[in-house]
Image (spheres, coloured by chain):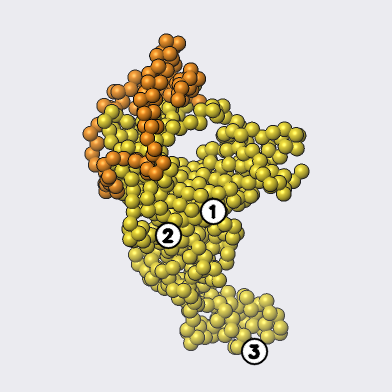
Chain colours: A orange, B yellow
């Protein structure tokens, strides 16, 4: 599979990344290499093999519906944001 | 040209679990400070791991059963990627490939059946508030458990769209899986609408009206879209496939700028959550906890309570449970009392928080049946049964304290009638009545009622008077 320039631009668009020309080119190269590496799997016939969704063979891991104290306070969490206002995270206008 | 509308509805239901879907933090953010019900999982801090809430699985089973749906033994979670400030993870954890709830149907009061395609569990996103130059993000709603219910396009009118949403709301409330508070967004509806010439083989191009939060707005949005699309087609134009927003004040939908080509969510299996594999026993055990549903009450009370009254009362699950507890023979009179209070007093919500006991309602109805209470007095005592100061005393004591119990004892009543007839001021009326003037009987009954301090049963008094004056 060949990664085209449009594919990179599409992915950048989906990810809300603004890429300059140099980055577009180098990311294209990186992605091409990754895809090429994974493509080795195409050499195998997997038509009879069920997809593996996880490798630990665990299932039904769930917890009780009880509130527990949290490790992080609102202040700690808000401290991680660039801008805040009225205890909310302030972001550029969207929509 | 005549067009047939075709409508499919997606409904998001917020589950009323104590904690969120993927972490042990408070799920009830109502009236709480912004960003106070959040955990590192909601915030998507590096290294965080989602921990699935077992209660949400149990509720999903109940919700599915309420809609006559198959419960899929095997289900699992996927990541749906999109970048938006309401989602710190950069993806939503949902069930895209293998949802927990399979096919089923919802039957509307009109008898129309709307098939359910599937329903799945997912985490809600945060809340954005938009201002002039910026938006504020509150993550309290992140990972509130949702069930998204996807209907088949089986709806063909605005009325049925309204009724479907309302019935879903009832089913979810009866199943006890949501608080059902529409005003606070506990249920939200996305409506897909297309129209096609009657008899056409193919469906028209659809528009999706997103994020409606009342049955009325669903109905109005569908009516508006049918008109808008009909006008376009009549003028030889085309309907554009797009997402539209609803402006409730203006009563119209407007196209939203959206990147249609960007609808590429790159789903992948959620590696942090092992799959769910439910045994048949577990599914049966949880399904058995489903309480009586609206259709059960329609069956039970259909011949007893008038249909229009029943449909109003069905909005209140606790009330239907109460009707089920009382004596069958009193269901009709008690349901009428509830209906008159709910309709006339406009206090429905507060009245229904703490209903009178079945014993009180039985006693009240029995007193009314024995004519110890007039219908006015019955309603009066009924209202007192909701009064926190009075309710503990019981229907009979309240009636006694208020002096509302009617005198039905013939001997006692005859004595009172004799006293009244012995009074000189009633002499003329007695003569007039004997002379054939029917209407003076009312005056005489009134005098007896006065003498009895309002406690005499007027129809019994009338009988006695007729007998004595004949």
| Alpha carbon separation for disc pair 2 and 1 | 27 Å
* Labels 1 & 3 near each other (Cβ < 8 A): no
Q: Are marks 3 and 2 on the same chain?
A: yes
Q: Subunit of mark 1?
A: B
Look at mark 3 in the image and give the residue it sits on: B470
Quarter where residue B388 is shown: bottom left
Q: Residue at x 24, y 36 (%)?
A: A70
Q: Going from the N terminus, do you reach mark 3 or mark 2 first?
A: 2
Vertical side of B172 occupied by B250: above or below:
above
Q: Subunit of mark 3?
A: B
Kind of element beneath mark 2: helix
Compare residues B411 and B420 and report the one nearer the observer. B411
Q: Residue at x 39, y 39 (%)?
A: A46
Q: Is residue B230 visible?
A: yes
* Labels 3 & 2 near each other (Cβ < 8 A): no
Compare residues A89 and B326 and report the one nearer the observer. A89
Q: Residue at x 60, y 50 (%)?
A: B155
At label 3, counting other C-alpha atoms closer than 10 Å, the crowd grade (few under 14, some 14-19, many 20 or more) is: few
Q: Subunit of mark 2?
A: B
Q: Position of residue B66 (x, y in %)?
A: 45, 57
| Alpha carbon separation for disc pair 3 and 2 | 53 Å
Look at mark 1 in the image and give the residue it sits on: B115
Q: Going from the N terminus, do you reach mark 1 or mark 3 first?
A: 1
Label 1 or label 3, whichever lies nearer to me, is 1
Circle number at residue B318 = 2
Q: Residue at x 40, y 32 (%)?
A: A42
Q: Going from the N terminus, do you reach mark 2 or mark 1 first?
A: 1
Q: Are marks 2 and 1 on the same chain?
A: yes
Kind of element beneath mark 3: loop
| Alpha carbon separation for disc pair 1 and 3 | 69 Å
Quarter where residue B265 is shown: top left
């Amino acid at each position: 599979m060949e990664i085209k320039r449009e594919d990179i631009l599409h992915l950048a668009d989906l990810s809300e990344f603004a890429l300059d020309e140099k980055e577009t080119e180098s990311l294209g190269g990186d992605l091409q290499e990754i895809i090429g590496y994974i493509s080795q799997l195409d050499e195998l016939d997997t038509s009879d093999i069920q997809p593996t969704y996880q490798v630990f063979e665990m299932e039904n891991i769930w917890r009780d519906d009880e509130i527990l104290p949290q490790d992080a306070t609102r202040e700690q969490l808000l401290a991680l944001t660039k801008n805040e206002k009225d205890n909310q995270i302030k972001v550029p206008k969207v929509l | 040209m005549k067009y047939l509308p075709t409508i499919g509805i997606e409904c998001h239901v917020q589950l009323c679990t104590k904690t969120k879907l993927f972490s042990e933090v408070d799920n009830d953010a109502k009236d709480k400070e912004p960003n106070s019900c959040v955990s590192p999982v909601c915030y998507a801090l590096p290294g965080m791991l989602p921990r699935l809430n077992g209660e949400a699985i149990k509720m999903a089973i109940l919700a599915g059963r309420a809609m006559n749906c198959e419960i899929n033994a095997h289900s699992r979670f996927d990541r749906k990627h999109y970048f938006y400030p309401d989602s710190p993870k950069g993806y939503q954890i949902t069930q895209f490939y293998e949802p927990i709830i399979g096919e089923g149907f919802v039957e509307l009061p009109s008898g129309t059946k709307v098939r359910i395609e599937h329903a799945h569990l997912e985490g809600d996103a945060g809340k954005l508030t938009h201002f002039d130059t910026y938006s504020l993000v509150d993550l309290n709603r992140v990972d509130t458990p949702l069930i998204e219910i996807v209907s088949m396009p089986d709806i063909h009118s605005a009325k049925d769209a309204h009724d479907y949403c309302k019935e879903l709301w009832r089913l979810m409330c009866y199943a006890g899986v949501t608080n059902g508070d529409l005003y606070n967004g506990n249920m939200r509806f996305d409506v897909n609408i297309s129209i096609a010439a009657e008899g056409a083989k193919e469906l028209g191009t659809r528009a999706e009206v997103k994020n409606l939060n009342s049955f009325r707005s669903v109905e109005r949005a569908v009516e508006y879209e049918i008109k808008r699309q009909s006008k376009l087609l009549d003028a030889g134009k085309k309907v554009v496939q797009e997402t539209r927003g609803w402006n409730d004040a203006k009563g119209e939908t407007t196209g939203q700028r959206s990147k249609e080509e960007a609808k590429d969510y790159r789903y992948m299996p959620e590696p942090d959550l092992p799959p769910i594999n439910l045994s048949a026993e577990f599914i049966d055990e949880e399904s058995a906890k489903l309480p009586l549903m609206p259709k059960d009450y329609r069956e039970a009370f259909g011949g007893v309570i008038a249909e229009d009254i029943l449909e109003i009362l069905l909005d209140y699950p606790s009330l239907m449970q109460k009707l089920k507890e009382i004596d069958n023979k009193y269901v009709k009179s008690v349901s009428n009392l509830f209906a008159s209070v709910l309709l006339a007093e406009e206090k429905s919500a507060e009245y229904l928080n703490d209903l009178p006991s079945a014993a009180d309602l039985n006693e009240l109805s029995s007193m009314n049946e024995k004519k110890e209470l007039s219908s006015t007095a019955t309603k009066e005592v009924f209202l007192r049964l909701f009064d926190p100061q009075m309710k503990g005393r019981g229907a009979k004591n309240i009636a006694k304290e208020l002096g509302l119990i009617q005198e039905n004892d013939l001997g006692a009543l005859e004595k009172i009638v004799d006293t009244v007839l012995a009074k000189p001021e009633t002499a003329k009326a007695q003569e007039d009545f004997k002379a054939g003037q029917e209407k003076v009987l009312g005056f005489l009954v009134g005098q007896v009622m006065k003498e009895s301090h309002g406690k005499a049963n007027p129809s019994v008094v009338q009988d006695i008077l007729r007998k004595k004056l004949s």
